[in-house]
Amino acid sequence: MKPYALGRRGEAEAEAYLQALGMRTLARRYRGGDGELDLVMEDGERIVFVEVKASARGEAGDGMCRVTPAKQKRIIHAASAFLLEREWMERPARFDVVEITAAGLRHVPCAFEASAWD
């Protein structure tokens, strides 16, 4: 499967999984700042910015390793743009990673924090 198609399928699988946990989808593939957000979900009052890493192969942890400090910085910039557009800067937020590999789906809540890039 081509990387783009694999990524789209991974995002759909991650979204369905998170919705099954009770989260509500606010946006898919949001572009803002100098980055992109794969999924923006709402978990109660909390806004959850989700980076999805899908690979046809690999083991648990491989997706997390691909969310580099530079990638985190771009995600944080996009998240800031998303919150500013909606005037939601006071709402609690977190950054999750969902990795999908040959080992299955792994959800990592609070995978990194924005304070690292303040």
Image (tube, helix red, strand yellow):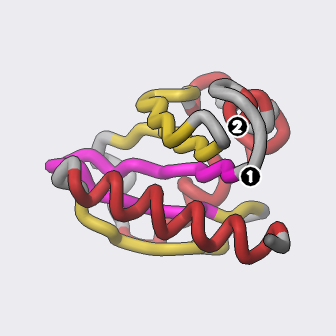
Instruction: Say left or right for 108 vs 2.
Output: left
Judging by the rendered image, the residue that carries numbered circle 1 is 56
Q: Is residue 43 magenta?
A: yes
Residue closer to the observer: 54 or 85: 54
Residue 10 picture location, percent across and down: 58, 61
Read off the magenta span. Answer: 37-54
Identify the element where label 2 is drawn: helix
- Assess disc 2: are there few (<14), some (14-19) or many (≥20) residues with their C-alpha within 10 Å of its C-alpha: many
The residue depicted at 53 percent of the width and 43 percent of the height is 98
**Mark found first going from the N terminus, 1 or 2:** 1
The C terminus sits in image quarter: top right
- Assess disc 1: are there few (<14), some (14-19) or many (≥20) residues with their C-alpha within 10 Å of its C-alpha: some
Report the number of numbered marks: 2
Residue 55 picture location, percent across and down: 74, 50
Check disc 1 and give the amino acid type: Ala
**Disc number at residue 76?**
none
The N terminus sits in image quarter: bottom right
Location of residue 45 with respect to 40 vertically, above or below: above
Identify the element where label 1 is drawn: loop
The residue depicted at 84 percent of the width and 73 percent of the height is 2
Judging by the rendered image, the residue that carries numbered circle 2 is 63
The residue depicted at 46 percent of the width and 62 percent of the height is 13
Judge depth for marks 1 and 2 and give the one in front: 1
Q: Is residue 110 magenta?
A: no
